[in-house]
Image (tube, rainbow, N blue to C red):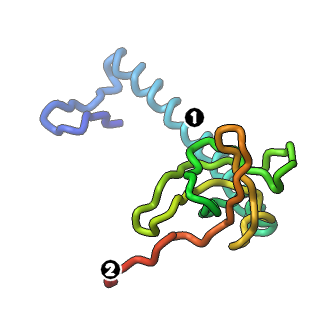
Amino acid sequence: MLVEPPTKHLGAPLDARRPVHRHLVGVVGDMLDQAHRDAELTAGVRDRVALHVHQVGAPRKRVGIKPDGRAPVRENAPLFADETSRELIGTVTSGGFGPSVNAPVAMGYVPSQFAANGTALFAEVRGQRLPVRVAPLPFSPHTYKR
């Protein structure tokens, strides 16, 4: 087994005849075996989750959010399905004023059934429920040439 740092001139091969090197070879070999087993386990779980999401659909989706008024909806603002509901359905991940669209814009995660463009929601800003709508992303079309 050859163990070297990234720079070639500082590395030296391990000699399995020397006791310290023999110990290092065993320890590193065990670590590599465990890492390989962990990678296989992780890949299996990852594949099952990906297959489930592909078959059933994602439970939440990232959506664009446009407030109906001029008040910006900021990060961590809770989202509700209606004005009186106590059940939190989503959260704003980022938001502020969008100079390109000359209006406040935000992004957040909501359950898939609320992710259709134009869906009316309510965001809580400073203790008040403000009406917002799910909007397509990006908020303004790009102007560059591909």
- Percent x, y of residue 119: 75, 68
Say which quadrant the C terminus sits in.
bottom left
Q: Secondary structure at mark 1?
A: helix
Q: Amino acid at mark 2?
A: Tyr
20 over 54 or under it: above or below: above
- Percent x, y of residue 21: 34, 21
Picture quadrant of residue 37: top right
Q: Can you see residue 140?
A: yes
Q: Is 71 on the left or on the right of 86, as rendered?
A: left
Q: Secondary structure at mark 2?
A: loop
Q: Residue furthest front?
A: 70
Q: Which residue is mark 2?
A: 144
Q: Earlier in the sequence, mark 2 or mark 1?
A: 1
Q: Residue at x 77, y 63 (%)?
A: 114
Q: Is 130 on the left or on the right of 94, as rendered?
A: right
Q: Which residue is mark 1?
A: 34
**Marks 2 and 1, how far apart in space?**
48 Å
Front residue of 98/16: it is 98
Front residue of 52/132: it is 132
Q: Residue furthest left?
A: 9
- Percent x, y of residue 105: 54, 59
